[in-house]
Amino acid sequence: MEKINIELRMFMTFKQYLPEGSLEGKAKMSLDDGATFGDILKILSIPVELPKIVIINGIIQGISDEINARILKEGDIVSIFPPVGGG
Amino acid sequence: MEGYTGKILRVNLTDGEFAVEDLDPDLIRQYVGGRGLGTKILYDEIDPAIDPLSPENKLIFLNGPLTGTGAPAGARYMVITKAPLTNTIACSNCGGSFGPELKQAGYDGIIFEGCSEEPVYLWIDNDNVEIRPAIDLWGKTTHETDDLIKAEIEDKFVARDTQIACIGPAGENMSKLACIISNRNRAAGRTGVGAVMGSKKLKAIAVRGTKGIKIANKEAFKKAVISAMDKLNAGPVTHEALPALGTPVLVNIVNECKILPTYNWQSSSYENANKISGETMAATIVTKHKGCFACSIACAKCTKVDSPDFKGEGEGPEYENIILMGSSCGIDDLAAIAKASYLCNELGMDTISVGGTIATAMELFEKGYLTEKDAGMKLNFGNAKALVAMTEKMGRGEGFGLVMADGGAPLAEKYGHPELFMGVKKLEAPAYDPRGVQGMGLQYATSNRGACHVRGYSMANEILGVHEKIDPLVTEGKAAVVITFQNLTAIIDSAGLCLFVALCPGFLYEEVQGLLNGATGFNYTIDELVQAGDRIWNLERLFNKKAGFTKEDDMLPKRLLEEPAGPNNDVCRLNEMLPEYYKLRGWDNGFPTQEKMSELGLK
């Protein structure tokens, strides 16, 4: 099966779910073509219900249920945060 | 009167006299307190067209009804005056313990009038009020001033409880970026309110109070406090993110969303953002957490820098100035940013405006419009030592620092490139690039004190999804969102609460209503509070109209309107939002119509 490569960036409490050997909260991942955001959660054992903010290529995504089915593509940068805020 | 003390102290600095006056309960009800009531008093008592640094300007310190009552995050006092930096209405808001102590002494606020010939400070110990000489304090930093005033007090318990608000050398020099500092590191920061204090030769206010604060309906208030605390303790931002990392928690998320001002807004993402992030700050310089009076959020971070070039200790930096002094100056050295922040607190300057002004100077320098000879140093992007050195020169009014101490707009104008000033109404913009968060662009353009994030933080929904998740990249519907946040913020400010409560899901009018009604017994309806927020916003707008502003001033810097950036490589499409904003506000030509004014009871 064809593979795609993405960059995963995890912040704050989500850093604990990164694959071993990841540096500065970042990891390269090779996924099956057609893989979804939900697949990343499964591979890294991230509980689906954890509240989170998801950003793909700088675009902030909608609520979790919709985002889980989002199909990823080659070169995507996926950033995951817990809820944050306040300037 | 409950919640309030019902008393305001009026001090005439020209003749050294003062009087205690009663506040009008009807007026309080219409304007709530703090920002709203202060604006009403200023609007009625001064001509908005005056020079802000003339003796005719008044300087009003005012609490909200919830300040000091024990309501969570109810620590705020506000400084209302005509702003030297922007010439607009000014309301700068500050936490810590000064406001609560002033209320304990029996006053909702103080109105300063006129101008003293010699430097003075005001001493308040309950009913004992004195105007004292401050010649020995003039020239001192805010920290030195705090120490020296307390050292004069014989009773060590009185000294311990005394709360001080003061200016540093920047305020004395009437720098238009000067702020007022209380509790050493808390600032009524924006629009140059410290310069007004300096123009009146008022170095400090020291207050101690023991009178207690009356609550109208103790049972109802207790219930409202518990409900508010439950919400704040369940909110991921107010219970986890802000207590853990403080406001710098935003650095990484704002960068990932590609709305992080970088190189004076030439770019909207920064390759070294992680080096200046909240996580890096927590791992390197944070020593302890600190909260304002009665606040469970405790977002303040005490920090210490050991590196020899930037050695120091204090509080912060905060998110906004990490970005304006950091990525916007191309600087990734957190120690230098912290040092520049400490200097701002000690010398009494607004960290956001100082960072924004230096970033403008750096772009002028890089493009060859400003030379090393002009500036007295190399002001290239990335020069961390120059950031710190120039901050100190600005605060002390030395050399080229004196030119820069009046802000980015006059600087960019002087060197022939006004388009390199990144702000609105001469107020340096805070740290969210509206090319990727459209509502914030409308907010900057329409805020009554210039480019400001704390007058309507639509970021809360556009990026953070606190109350409702909405798309930051579209303009549709943003006018209504911005108006909702602007009016709500006017009520939160006027009540004496910290705006951060609105970063808690569901902490909206109902919570504020519960707290206000418990404390004051006013029995406000939600509709009444929504209308009061609208009234306050419109009155501020009318002040600006009389000060000479027109709708042409509701404008963003050209760069944000014409040079694409952000995740969609877009501009801020202000023209798609502004007409709808005016329409929903009930304004014609940028100002309230007669009909709108009648609806709100404004003249």
Image (tube, rainbow, N blue to C red):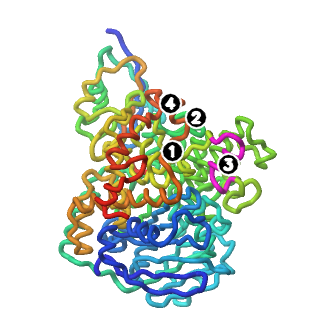
To which residue does mark 4 refer?
B565
Chain letter of disc 1?
B
**Label 2 – label 4 distance at C-alpha:** 8 Å
Label 2 or label 4, whichever comes before in sequence order: 2
Q: Nearer the viewer, residue B557 or B517?
A: B557
**Label 4 – label 1 distance at C-alpha:** 24 Å
Q: Are marks 4 and 3 in contact (CB under 8 Å)?
A: no
Which is closer to the viewer, label 4 or label 1? 1
Q: Secondary structure at mark 2?
A: loop
Label 3 or label 1, whichever comes before in sequence order: 3
Report the residue at 56% width, 90% height from top: B154
Label 1 or label 2, whichever comes before in sequence order: 2
Label 4 or label 3, whichever comes before in sequence order: 3
Residue projecting furthest to the top: A1
**Label 4 – label 3 distance at C-alpha:** 25 Å
Label 4 or label 1, whichever comes before in sequence order: 1
Q: Nearer the viewer, residue B386 or B482?
A: B482
The answer to whether residue B437 is seen in the rendering is yes
Query: What is the magenta range?
Result: B404-418
To which residue does mark 1 refer?
B552
- Please, what is the three-letter code of the amino acid marked with disc 3? Leu
Q: Secondary structure at mark 1?
A: helix
Q: Are marks 4 and 3 on the same chain?
A: yes
- Please, what is the three-letter code of the amino acid marked with disc 4? Ala
To which residue does mark 3 refer?
B411
Q: Quadrant of the C terminus of chain B?
A: bottom left
To which residue does mark 2 refer?
B266
